[in-house]
């Protein structure tokens, strides 16, 4: 490679102009930095080559126009500006200067290594007396706060959470239960202080008065707001049976729960009730740490309703290979204890299982109880009802994340309640823009992932009500792409070891492209344009 250096920059010839056609990308290295070079409509651009979420190589992702989508978890970046356009992740990509001369493409990078770029944000302007209160310490609240600061809102921002910690990546709590807190904080405290984002921890909301525009806390204090975001998430559904109140019956809701479950399970007998994504991830994590792990599920296979019996059976076999035992089509009648602690679990079919700890993962309830005395519209499942701008029926009250029921464009704007990390961030961004009267309607495609024993299943779309699954590859080989069919149309897809198929399908669904059952059934997948 030819290279020239000056000041703190380094310029290298990275490829010939003819090496890339329109719609193609190439990963190059300049000064030890991985950079993605893209050609679109004859123009060359260069951005950081690693996703800002978990560092996945974007070269393995999907490029459509001026947008690249990460192959792992679906984050999208503009290849001209580097800006993040779809989540997860908070930061954008660094952008590099590109020059084409005599048929050669040159990229200039700063010698200082940069993998991420924080979007330009303002700080608190003391002369502005306006106050936005964000209830909840999750990704929806944080994204809303950063969106406000990115759009020159200088008023006060107060994020309140009943957790003891600053906002953190809770998706990791079921996958790495002994992880250090600093490794999963979404933002460090000095970052939040720099941009004037107040975070009140250990602060539980008791009620809201939407007429007086006040929030009352459990400690008796009251805070006025001008605009309010309800992003209080969901709480783990408690077990309803005798003995559920015993000391060693645990729910996984926060960082402290994760560390306690890790410590209490080590070398002991762990029983997990529920084959939810969290329950299965916890079982996988504990499989080589607990003395033994047992899962109790009420269906024939895990994930039967969401991912289907074939994928469920495969995940069951994966965990059985690690000596995890399953009691399926079953349930819990009673938990028996001794000295206030779990001793054994009695199943509906009569089995009695010795246990030292019981972990419950049987679903989530939206946290909206504190709104019961307000006129904020709540649906039959406890979710806060919002429109496409994340507005509730009450002026200046917005809602986002796991607590909401929102209109999903993918299904004709039918209201849905979906607990995905990526969606919570998308909601938070739309809510922030709506607070600033920059109305942008929610337009995103659900995308989530689960990790079991180092294998990641990816999923996109909205598969509720599907009536058929078409497989490419096979669950037996543990390499597959599954299309979920409703009528004559693909409504969702899941994959294992089939990247970047799910990201490609997410982009197609995002663009409103109809994917037919016939396309899914065909042996010819050229329409997917996979590498």
Image (cartoon, grey):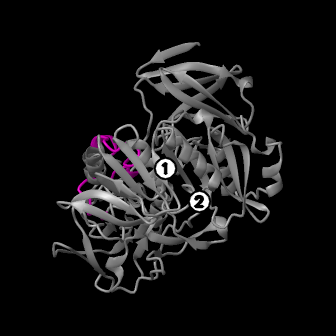
Q: Is residue 163 magenta?
A: yes
Residue 99 in the figure: left or right of residue 32 = right
Secondary structure of residue under mark 2: loop
Q: Earlier in the sequence, mark 1 or mark 2?
A: 1
Q: Residues within 10 Å of mark 2 (few under 14, many from 20)?
A: some
* Magenta highlight on residue 164: yes
Question: The C terminus is located in which quarter?
Answer: top right
* Residue at x-position 42% and y-position 81%: 395
On screen, residue 527 versus residue 277, left or right, reads: right
In this view, the residue farthest toward the top is 2
Say above or below: 392 vs 188. below
- The quarter of the picture where residue 324 lies is top left
Read off the residue under disc 1.
88
> Which callout, 1 or 2, points to the residue nearer the camera?
2
| Above or below, 272 relative to 262 | below
Q: Could you say whether the residue bearing mark 1 is in a helix, strand or loop? A: loop
Residue 235 at x, y = what percent?
Answer: 36, 66
Q: Nearer the viewer, residue 99 or 182?
A: 182
Q: Can residue 130 be seen?
A: yes
Q: How many residues crowd mark 1 within 10 Å: few (<14), some (14–19), many (20+)?
A: many
Judged by its main secondary structure, the magenta piece is loop
Q: The magenta stretch spans which residues?
A: 155-184
The residue sitting at 61% across, 73% down in the picture is 414
Residue 327 at x, y percent in the picture: 48, 55
State which quadrant residue 151 falls in. bottom left
Q: Which mark is residue 19?
A: none
Q: Position of residue 18 (x, y in %)?
A: 75, 24
How many angstroms separate mark 1 from mark 2 (CA)? 21 Å
Which quadrant holds the N terminus? top right
Q: Residue under circle 2?
A: 306
């Amino acid at each position: 490679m030819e290279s020239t250096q000056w000041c703190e920059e380094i310029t290298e010839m990275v490829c010939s102009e003819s090496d890339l056609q329109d719609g193609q990308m190439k990963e190059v290295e300049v000064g030890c930095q991985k950079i993605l070079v893209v050609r679109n409509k004859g123009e060359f651009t260069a951005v950081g080559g690693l996703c800002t979420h978990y560092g996945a190589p974007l070269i393995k992702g999907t490029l459509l126009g001026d947008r690249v989508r990460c192959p792992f978890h679906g984050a999208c970046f503009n290849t001209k500006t580097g800006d993040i356009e779809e989540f997860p992740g908070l930061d954008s990509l660094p952008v590099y200067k590109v020059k084409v001369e005599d048929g050669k493409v040159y990229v200039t990078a700063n010698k200082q290594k940069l993998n991420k770029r924080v979007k330009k944000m303002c700080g608190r302007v003391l002369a502005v007396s306006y106050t936005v209160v964000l209830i909840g310490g999750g990704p929806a609240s944080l994204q809303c706060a950063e969106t406000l600061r990115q759009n020159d809102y200088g008023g006060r921002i107060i994020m309140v959470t009943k957790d003891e910690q600053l906002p953190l990546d809770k998706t990791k709590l079921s996958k790495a239960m002994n992880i250090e807190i600093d490794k999963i904080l979404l933002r460090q405290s000095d970052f939040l202080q720099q941009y004037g984002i107040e975070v009140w921890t250990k602060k539980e909301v008791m009620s809201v008065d939407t007429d007086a525009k006040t929030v009352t806390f459990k400690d008796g204090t009251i805070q006025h707001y001008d605009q309010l975001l309800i992003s209080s998430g969901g709480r783990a559904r408690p077990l309803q049976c005798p003995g559920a109140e015993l000391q060693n019956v645990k729910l996984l809701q926060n960082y402290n729960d994760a560390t306690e479950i890790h410590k209490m399970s080590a070398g002991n007998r762990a029983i997990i009730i529920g084959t939810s994504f969290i329950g299965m991830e916890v079982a996988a994590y504990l499989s080589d740490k607990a003395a033994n792990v047992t899962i109790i599920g009420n269906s024939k296979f895990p994930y039967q309703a969401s991912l289907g019996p074939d994928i469920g059976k495969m995940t069951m076999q994966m965990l059985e290979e690690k000596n995890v035992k399953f009691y399926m089509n079953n349930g819990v009648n009673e938990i028996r204890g001794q000295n206030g602690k779990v001793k054994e679990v009695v199943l509906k079919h009569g089995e009695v299982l010795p246990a030292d700890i019981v972990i419950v993962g049987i679903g989530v309830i939206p946290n909206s109880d504190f709104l019961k005395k307000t006129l904020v519209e709540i649906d039959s499942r406890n979710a806060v009802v919002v429109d496409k701008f994340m507005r509730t029926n009450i002026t200046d009250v917005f809602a986002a994340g796991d607590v909401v029921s929102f209109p999903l464009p993918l299904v004709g704007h039918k209201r849905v309640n979906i607990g995905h990390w990526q969606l919570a961030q998308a909601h938070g961004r739309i809510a922030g823009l709506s607070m600033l009267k920059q109305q942008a309607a929610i337009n995103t495609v659900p995308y989530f992932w689960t990790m079991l024993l180092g294998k990641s299943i990816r999923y996109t779309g909205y598969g509720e009500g599907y009536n058929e699954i078409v497989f490419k590859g096979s669950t037996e080989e543990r390499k597959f792409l599954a299309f979920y069919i409703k009528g004559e149309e693909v409504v969702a897809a899941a994959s294992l070891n089939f990247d970047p198929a799910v990201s490609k399908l997410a982009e197609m669904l995002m663009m409103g492209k109809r994917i037919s059952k016939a396309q899914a059934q065909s042996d010819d997948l050229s329409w997917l344009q996979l590498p």
